[in-house]
């Protein structure tokens, strides 16, 4: 919902002033908390924050006067009143009611939190407005990812973010890209080389990258009670690949609530699991942080781990298989599928609770008020394919693999079959795998998760469509059929395009790495494994990524970004304004195969 203003020129000036003020606020936080010793005095930075606060208040006052409807303005920015009230309460009562040891510090902390809340709200809302500006929504998505990656890299280069002697820009950019693209490939040890501040930055990038900052902005707008306009809903429909425009707000709300609920259950289930390298249990704060970190990393299919050996030291813990694995699977199913399953489940429960879920018709018979919620074709394909790939991957690694680590039990093969398509955690040493094992994992990484999820790859539905195209061709069927439903030719064409583009990027990326790493002596299967892991945003590694040259790291960075956004999205952003041809050439038979 947008507020209409009388003087549009004044509104433009206010937007520029607000943008510059937001940049200043972010800079003050970087200077205050990013360095061991602030580059400017704390007093100076606090005065700048007070000035920024005055600008934000003046901006709201001017916009209130400039608005056509004061009621409309208050309805959109209703949250400003409780925020200001809370800030006023803290400032006035810091020394008396709250009895703080350092009232001045508490006041400035509250002011800083208020300012950052303003910056986050304005940034997220700007992303939604950009996506709904009438331009290609894919460009807004790509732009938001690039800005998030650059900002994350800058945060990771701050002295308080890392424990090593120095952090190069390429390594910071690589880590930020891997976190934002929820990949999990690393060139620095997440647990050892980054401080808690750096780990929090990585975790924030994982969560924002997993959901998508544009979707996060829409979630924030809905939480603040601001209804999405028709144009914004259309943009969200495009980004979410949703089928019905009217359900966009409900789906976005479900994404937020579902994500928080699933991750919270994961956090509670992982408590009391973690031990440090000496085998001693972590303290309470560390247990909570480790649980939060790994729950979010698992559900977002990021694969980042605070242990140098990933989950190898926990391969005998039931929580790894009962908690981590389901989190990975749920994150890889796709929010649309989860929403449909939730609707089907709620409908069945409602009908069980109310057996007479209907009214009597003229004939005296019971007729349902509404039709039962059915499982969509997309959901059927995703569930069936995900289950089949997990089982097939497990059996393939047990039968064809020659690694002693994999043949020790079914659990190792099962976990790697699950994580290879999406997450990147590992309970076995990837470097010790045989060539057959690596090839199986490459195929799983290439297929990836499901559409609309946090996973990468060509996606399960694309894989099934390609298989059914072959099946229909062999049986000489005119249409591609799945679960007694026909698939439209445009969907078939898109599936073929995605597969071909992914294969091309995989081969081209592998070729480039063989050139840049020609002096490193890496095996070709290891190079292709790293490329497939980056393209599928998986994060499994044979251990060669930290040893890549600068050029090699940049190639992997580009591959991760392409894999997260998808080659088709990148092409769509470039070809958005191209109009379809208004003519057809005469057909002529050709021979293929």
Image (cartoon, helix red, strand yellow):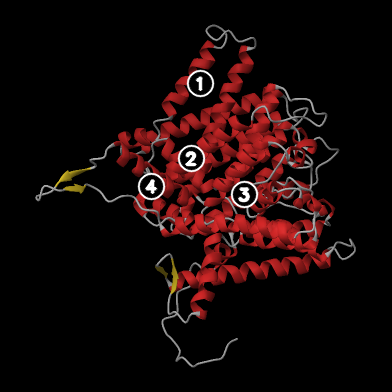
Q: Secondary structure at mark 4?
A: helix
Label 3 to label 1: alpha-carbon separation: 30 Å
Direction left: furthest residue: 362
Label 2 to label 3: alpha-carbon separation: 26 Å
Residue 258 numbered tag: 2
Q: Is residue 138 above or below residue 81?
A: below
Closer to the camera: disc 1 or disc 4? Answer: 4
- Looking at the image, residue 170 sits to the left or right of residue 272; the answer is right
Q: In this view of the protein, which residue sits in the foreground, 561 or 447? A: 447
Q: Secondary structure at mark 3?
A: helix
- Looking at the image, residue 251 sits to the left or right of residue 332; the answer is left
Identify which residue is drawn at 54% across, 6% down.
96
Q: Is residue 49 above or below residue 214?
A: above
Check whether the beta carbons of the residues at disc 3 and disc 1 lie within 8 A of each other. Answer: no
- Looking at the image, residue 124 sits to the left or right of residue 197; the answer is left
Check whether the beta carbons of the residues at disc 2 and disc 3 lie within 8 A of each other. Answer: no
Residue identified by numbered label 3: 147
Residue 344 numbered tag: 4
Q: Is residue 279 something one can see in this rendering?
A: yes
Q: Disc 4 or 3, which lies upstream in sequence?
A: 3
Closer to the camera: disc 2 or disc 3? Answer: 2
Dividing the picture into quadrants, the one containing residue 300 is top right
Q: Disc 1 or 2, which lies upstream in sequence?
A: 1
Identify which residue is drawn at 48% across, 80% down.
475
Q: In this view of the protein, which residue sits in the foreground, 408 or 488? A: 408
Q: Disc 2 or 4, which lies upstream in sequence?
A: 2
Identify which residue is drawn at 51% across, 51% down.
334
Residue identified by numbered label 1: 87
């Amino acid at each position: 919902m947008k507020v209409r203003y009388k003087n549009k020129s004044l509104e433009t000036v206010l937007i520029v002033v607000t943008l510059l003020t937001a940049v200043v606020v972010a800079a003050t936080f970087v200077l205050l908390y990013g360095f061991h010793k602030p580059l400017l005095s704390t007093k100076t930075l606090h005065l700048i924050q007070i000035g920024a606060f005055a600008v934000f208040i003046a901006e709201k006052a001017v916009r209130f006067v400039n608005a056509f409807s004061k009621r409309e303005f208050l309805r959109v920015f209703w949250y400003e009143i409780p925020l200001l009230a809370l800030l006023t309460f803290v400032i006035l009562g810091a020394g008396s009611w709250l009895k703080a040891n350092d009232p001045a510090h508490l006041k400035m902390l509250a002011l800083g939190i208020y300012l950052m809340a303003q910056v986050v709200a304005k940034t997220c809302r700007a992303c939604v407005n950009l996506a709904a500006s009438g331009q290609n929504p894919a460009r807004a998505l790509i732009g938001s990812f690039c800005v998030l990656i650059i900002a994350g890299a800058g945060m990771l280069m701050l002295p308080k973010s890392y424990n090593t002697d120095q952090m190069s820009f390429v390594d910071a950019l690589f880590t930020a890209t891997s976190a934002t693209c929820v990949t999990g490939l690393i060139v620095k040890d997440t647990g050892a080389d980054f401080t808690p501040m750096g780990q929090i930055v990585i975790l924030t990038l994982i969560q924002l990258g997993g959901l998508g900052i544009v979707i996060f902005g829409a979630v924030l707008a809905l939480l603040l009670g601001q209804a999405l306009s028709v144009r914004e809903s259309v943009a969200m429909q495009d980004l979410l690949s949703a089928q019905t425009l009217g359900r966009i707000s409900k789906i976005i709300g479900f994404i937020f609530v579902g994500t928080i609920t699933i991750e919270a259950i994961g956090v509670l289930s992982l408590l009391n699991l973690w031990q440090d390298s000496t085998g001693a249990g972590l303290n309470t704060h560390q247990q909570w942080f480790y649980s939060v970190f790994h729950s979010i990393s698992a559900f977002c299919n990021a694969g980042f781990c605070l242990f140098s050996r990933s989950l190898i030291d926990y391969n005998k813990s039931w929580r790894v298989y009962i908690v981590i694995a389901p989190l990975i699977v749920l994150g890889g199913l796709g929010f649309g599928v989860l929403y449909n399953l939730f609707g089907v489940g709620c409908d069945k429960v409602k009908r069980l609770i109310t057996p007479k879920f209907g009214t009597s018709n003229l004939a005296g018979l019971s007729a349902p008020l509404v039709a039962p919620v059915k499982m969509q074709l997309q959901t059927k394909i995703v569930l069936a394919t995900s289950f089949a790939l997990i089982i097939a991957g497990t059996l393939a690694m047990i039968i064809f693999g020659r690694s002693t680590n994999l043949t020790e039990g079914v659990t190792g093969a099962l976990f790697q079959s699950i994580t290879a398509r999406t997450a990147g955690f590992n309970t076995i040493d990837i470097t010790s795998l045989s060539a057959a094992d690596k090839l199986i994992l490459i195929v799983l990484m290439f297929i990836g998760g499901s559409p609309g999820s946090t996973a990468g790859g060509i996606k399960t539905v694309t894989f099934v469509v390609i298989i059914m195209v072959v099946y229909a061709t062999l049986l000489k069927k005119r249409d591609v059929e799945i679960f007694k439903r026909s698939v439209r030719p445009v969907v078939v064409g898109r599936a073929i395009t995605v597969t071909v583009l992914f294969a091309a990027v995989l081969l081209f990326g592998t070729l480039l790495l063989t050139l840049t790493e020609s002096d490193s002596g890496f095996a070709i299967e290891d190079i292709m494994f790293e490329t497939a892991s980056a393209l599928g945003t998986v994060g499994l590694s044979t251990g060669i990524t930290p040893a890549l040259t600068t050029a090699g790291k940049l190639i992997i960075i580009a591959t991760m970004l392409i894999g997260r956004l998808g080659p088709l999205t990148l092409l769509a952003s470039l070809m958005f304004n191209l109009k379809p041809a208004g003519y057809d050439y005469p057909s002529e038979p050709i021979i293929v195969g």
